[in-house]
Image (cartoon, rainbow, N blue to C red):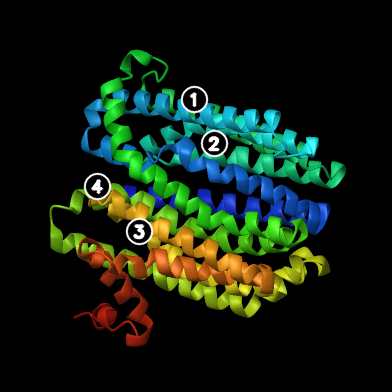
Amino acid sequence: MNLNKIISNTSWLIADKIVLMVANLLVTIFLARSFGPEDYGTFSYILAIVAISAPISALGLNAIVTREIVNEPTWLNKIISTTLFLRLSAALFVSLFFITLILVSDFFPDKRQALTLSILAIGNIFTSVQVLDFWFQAKVLAKNVTKMKFLITIFSAFLKIIVAVIYQDILYVAAIYALEIIFTAFGFIYIYLNSAKSSIFNFKFVDFIYAKKLLKQSGWLILSGIASIIYLKIDQLMLNYMIGPESVGTYAVASRLSEVWYFFANALVITLFPTLLKLKSDNANYLKKLQSICDALFISALFLAIFVTIFGDFFIDILFGEAYQKSGFILQLHIWASLFVFMRALASKWLIAEGLLKFSLLSHGIGAVINIIANYFLIPIYQGEGAAIATVFSYLTASFLAFFISKSTRVIAMIMLQSILLPFTLGKRYWYIISGK
């Protein structure tokens, strides 16, 4: 693949994530300040519930679709049409489940909160169209998509801020979140139709035998995704039930500032995944490439964690004010999870490339169980700080230590270990670049 094309695509992907990061940060600041810790905590709790359903809607097909397009480019219509049909069906099922749960139970006794969840559930249906993004990733064509997402992200962020400041109502803000997803979906459709010169709405290309094959491959990834999002969001759900919405608010501010940086790892790994797949037949270069990417991810996360540990408290005070003082120390703890999150972004793609999907579920399952247990014991004592400690420990276990369990995954475990040891060796294996030898 042309190096300039990869660099250009990576630049657009990173630019997209930077704009998204800045927009989300501004929205978080205004929502948190306008709502206050308690109402912002309630809104974050509802978002966490919706987030837990996301892996079911996605059906674990994300990286599989990219692989299929790279390996079988002549199947383009079949891959896109079949995957879109599957994800649309799953998203409809999840949304109807939430709405039914709200109508027939007391899951959300507060009617406005129930309506907020319903609106977000309806918006979730349109996330199915984002499967088209994987076509652009496989073709290394991010420019037009990024421009479209720039416009929608900036405009919707502006609307969220205005609505939050004027109305201070989570229901109206949820409506903007849903509209953003809907407009993004139509943007993807428009750009795809112009780029691919084919119609995704011609369902004669839906292959049900192929769909069954995809679901069989993705089954472990669906469960893995559910486990992954559980140990990413379970802390907010447990804080809400064990302490209250105000603690969720102070914790959500810190976790958002920590998690917003994960874009870098995802953007780099996503754009390089097709290239890694093509290198797989050349084992020496394949492993060398894996090591260099893992090194870059770990060192980036290390510098980020050190920076936030030093200045995190200051930024919380400046950006969110006195009401969120507790968020500072939570952020300083939570940011260290990024060391393992960054490397896990690469390891997750490696597991798919190697066909080790069952281990993806095992590692995420371990992380989810450990996070739940750690939260159960730490939250009553340390509240948000306890949840942050539980998060770091669960990521350390699930995204690094768990890879030593199986012989088949120790390759990536050793690659990650070499990256972790890199600062202690002063980057010795890269000295040849400086010396020119």
* Label 2 secondary element: helix
Q: Residues within 10 Å of mark 2 (few under 14, many from 20)?
A: some
* Label 3 secondary element: helix
Q: Residues within 10 Å of mark 1 (few under 14, many from 20)?
A: few
Q: Are marks 1 and 2 in contact (CB under 8 Å)?
A: yes
Mark 3 vs mark 1: which is more N-terminal? 1
Picture layout, residue 193 above or below residue 9:
above
Question: What's the CA distance linking mark 3 and mark 4?
Answer: 19 Å
Q: Determine which of the numbered discs, if any, sits on residue 190 in the image.
A: 1
Mark 3 or 2: in front is 3
Q: Amino acid at mark 1?
A: Tyr
Residue 95's quadrant in the figure? top right
Q: Mark 4 — residue? A: 1
Please indicate whether residue 284 sits to the left or right of residue 274 in the image.
left
Query: In x, y percent, where is residue 229?
Result: 50, 51
Q: Residue furthest right?
A: 166
Picture layout, residue 182 above or below residue 140:
above
Query: In x, y percent, where is residue 88?
Result: 47, 26
Residue at 39% across / 56% down in the picture? 268
Query: In x, y percent, where is residue 235?
Result: 60, 59
Residue at 76% across / 53% down in the picture? 40
Q: Amino acid at mark 4?
A: Met
Mark 3 or 4: in front is 3
Mark 4 vs mark 2: which is more N-terminal? 4
Mark 1 vs mark 4: which is more N-terminal? 4
